[in-house]
Image (tube, helix red, strand yellow):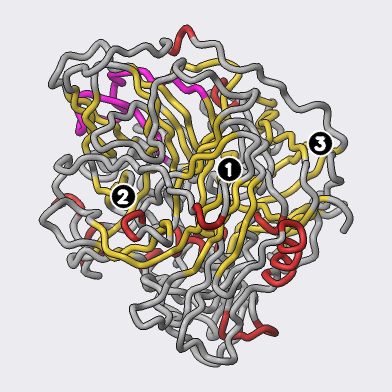
């Protein structure tokens, strides 16, 4: 019998932890057979953490304007002395030195609109298109440029099992956490190919909604979109917060993000921010002189695997996940390449494996982002990186904010649970440590699908020698006095919760096994609704829209997770509040934890539980909601919704 994983339903353990026991991820021996670099052989803590500089503006395009391309380049992701890695990343098109994985940070100010021309520059030196770095499964419902205009954004049919798609790569960038109009959302069907030589004449060069959004944007702002580009406008009227941008192309988001397409977008100022000097700083700003010491640092944590030549490894066959070797599409309904989840065997922080950060005995502000495709992180600072899990925390993590900005009050935590796409704005106080002291940021989340619970009790923590370590801190002499306010004494900006809801909407999370092969699954994971009898109704991306909130309305969304895994659910262009969670079928309602009581754009929906969120819809248009386990999203676990008239 072939099955996804063996599981044991345990129940509830305190707070809001609903969980199952996951099995181990893909074995190291299985990966070794594919030429994957043994992560235990990668040297740790020999390269410094990269602190992404600020993205430079494009003065030629007007005030508060950027021209940002996506290119292929080589970067020293592994330690010096090992091969470089070919990645994709963002950068200012007029400044080749700014292309980096992760991207340089976009600094935005409340009330100052920003224009970004996003350019697909995935071209070789001769202007011909580049194929994908990673294996594209063309049997999924995806952008599908070979389908031409009639067949784009579809699930194509085949008479024999195809190999990976090797054509030009579509992209479209989403500002995750923003509050913008539909034409600037980075909608999955608004993708575009590079303006490249060699693209077959019958290929679709843009997605189904590209022309509509381009026309609407040009009429609104007077700026046309050129071939291979999209021009997005961000109003920056939301709360000061840690946002991020990443690719969102239909059916290949997992691959484009894994290749390196991600970066921070920090929104500052306005009534929901603190005055400069209260929190640790400075952060990188344009024009900073070399050697500037930063005490506010954005940190994105991702898991990756590498081949022995330094290249990125990503599964080339479904067999790596569950040893199922076919028959695949069209001999069955199982995709030949797509894996239901993938967990890399090495940790990469700001584009380097296991870096070290020199810090002074002072307070630091860290903007943390879980940028993994599927891995849930449980982060903790300890004195011994290989100590038995769960480890004793050496320093507290003071959380000030989540995805939607500051919390009502600071929360002192021993560990941080971050699902994919979640962010935490924290302060770490190193003032009590002597010079030369060493501390480590570790991860106690599992090397497998997360379903809740506690490391060491309900699931095995990540491998302490590899994925259980993230980065190192080394205390250096104090250079300047720390005048920031201790986190325990902070008063955060006034917090105004959302008002009463106009209606409650029930939605479902569903996992489907093969309809043709007994005991093989999952085939796909779907969002959906319920029929009048309370039976879940799984729906695909192309099914009619069922969520159509009125503009300006406030709704409760009841997210019924009917699967074995926890799913981080993201709703585009809104910030919501968690109301409560409830075990299915008849558990008591549990309020959100203290660190979940701010505004969020991504919520962890635990298995066999209802998660309720209160959402206000402030922009009319067509958007999407989905699971941010990117492998799930790319195989149908996303749905369009429309705000305002249908």
Q: CA distance from mark 2 to mark 1?
A: 32 Å
Residue 627, label in figure: none
The foreground one among 513 and 296 is 296
Q: Which residue is at a point 33% across and 78% down the rendered structure image?
A: 125
- The residue positioned farthest toward the left in the image shown: 81
Q: CA distance from mark 3 to mark 2?
A: 39 Å
The residue indicated by pointer 1 is 607
Q: Is residue 372 visible?
A: yes
Which of the image's four quarters has the N terminus? bottom left
| Total marks placed | 3
Q: Earlier in the sequence, mark 1 or mark 3?
A: 3
Element marked by disc 1: loop
Q: Position of residue 232 (x, y in %)?
A: 62, 56
Which of the image's four quarters has the C terminus? bottom right
The residue stretch that appears in magenta = 377-400
The answer to which image quadrant residue 544 occupies is bottom right
The foreground one among 514 and 166 is 166
The foreground one among 540 and 479 is 479
Q: Position of residue 159 (x, y in %)?
A: 55, 92
The residue indicated by pointer 3 is 554
């Amino acid at each position: 019998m072939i099955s996804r994983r063996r599981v044991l339903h345990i129940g509830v353990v305190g707070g809001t932890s609903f969980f199952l026991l996951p099995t181990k991820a893909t074995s190291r021996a299985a990966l070794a057979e594919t030429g994957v670099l043994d992560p235990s052989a990668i040297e740790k803590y020999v390269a410094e953490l990269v602190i992404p500089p600020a993205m430079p503006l494009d003065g030629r395009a007007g005030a508060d304007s950027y021209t940002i391309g996506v290119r292929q380049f080589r970067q020293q992701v592994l330690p010096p002395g090992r091969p470089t890695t070919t990645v994709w990343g963002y950068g200012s098109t007029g400044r080749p030195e700014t292309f980096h994985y992760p991207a340089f940070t976009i600094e935005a100010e409340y009330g100052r609109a920003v224009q970004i021309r996003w350019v697909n520059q995935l071209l070789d030196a001769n202007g011909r298109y580049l194929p994908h770095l990673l294996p594209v499964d063309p049997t999924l419902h995806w952008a599908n440029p070979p389908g031409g205009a009639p067949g784009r954004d579809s699930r194509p049919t085949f008479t024999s099992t195809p190999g990976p798609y090797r054509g030009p790569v579509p992209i479209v960038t989403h500002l995750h956490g923003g509050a913008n109009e539909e034409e600037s959302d980075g909608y999955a069907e608004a993708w575009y190919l590079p303006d490249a030589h060699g693209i077959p004449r019958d290929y679709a060069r843009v997605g189904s909604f590209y022309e509509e959004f381009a026309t609407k944007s040009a009429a609104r702002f007077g700026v046309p979109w050129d071939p291979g580009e999209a021009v997005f406008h961000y109003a920056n009227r939301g709360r000061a917060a840690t946002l991020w941008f990443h690719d969102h192309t239909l059916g290949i988001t997992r691959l484009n993000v894994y290749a390196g397409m991600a970066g921070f977008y920090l929104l500052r100022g306005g009534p929901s921010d603190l005055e400069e000097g209260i929190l640790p700083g400075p952060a990188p700003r344009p024009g900073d002189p070399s050697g500037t010491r930063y005490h506010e640092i954005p940190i994105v944590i991702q898991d990756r695997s590498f081949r022995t030549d330094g290249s990125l490894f990503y599964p080339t066959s479904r067999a790596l996940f569950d040893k199922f070797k076919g028959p695949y599409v069209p001999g069955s309904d199982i995709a030949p390449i797509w894996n239901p989840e993938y967990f890399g065997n090495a940790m990469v922080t700001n584009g380097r494996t296991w870096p070290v950060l020199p810090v002074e005995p002072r307070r630091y502000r860290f903007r943390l982002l879980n940028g993994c495709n599927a891995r849930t992180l449980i982060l903790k600072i300890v004195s011994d990186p290989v100590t038995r899990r769960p480890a004793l925390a050496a320093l507290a993590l003071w959380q000030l904010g989540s995805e939607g900005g500051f919390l009502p009050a600071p929360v002192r935590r021993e560990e941080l649970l971050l699902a994919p796409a979640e962010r935490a704005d924290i302060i770490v106080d190193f003032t009590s440590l002597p010079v030369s002291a060493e501390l480590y940021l570790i991860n106690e989340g599992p090397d497998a699908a997360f379903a809740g619970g506690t490391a060491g009790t309900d699931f095995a923590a990540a491998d302490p020698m590899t994925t259980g370590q993230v980065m190192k801190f080394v205390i250096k002499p104090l250079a300047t006095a720390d005048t920031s306010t201790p986190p325990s004494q902070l008063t955060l900006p006034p917090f105004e919760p959302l008002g009463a809801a106009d209606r409650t909407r029930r939605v479902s999370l569903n996992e489907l096994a093969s309809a043709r092969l007994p005991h093989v699954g999952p085939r796909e994971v779907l969002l959906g609704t319920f029929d009048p009898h309370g039976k879940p109704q799984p729906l695909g991306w192309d099914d009619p829209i069922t969520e159509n909130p009125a503009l300006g309305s406030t709704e409760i969304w009841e997210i019924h997770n009917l699967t074995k895994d926890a799913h981080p659910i993201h709703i585009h262009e809104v910030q919501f509040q968690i109301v409560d969670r409830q075990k299915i079928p008849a558990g008591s309602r549990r309020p959100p934890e203290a660190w979940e009581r701010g505004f969020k754009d991504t919520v962890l929906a635990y298995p066999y539980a209802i998660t309720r969120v209160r959402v206000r819809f402030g922009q009319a248009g067509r958007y999407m909601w989905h699971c941010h386990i990117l492998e799930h999203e790319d195989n149908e676990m996303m749905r369009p919704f429309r705000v305002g008239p249908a």
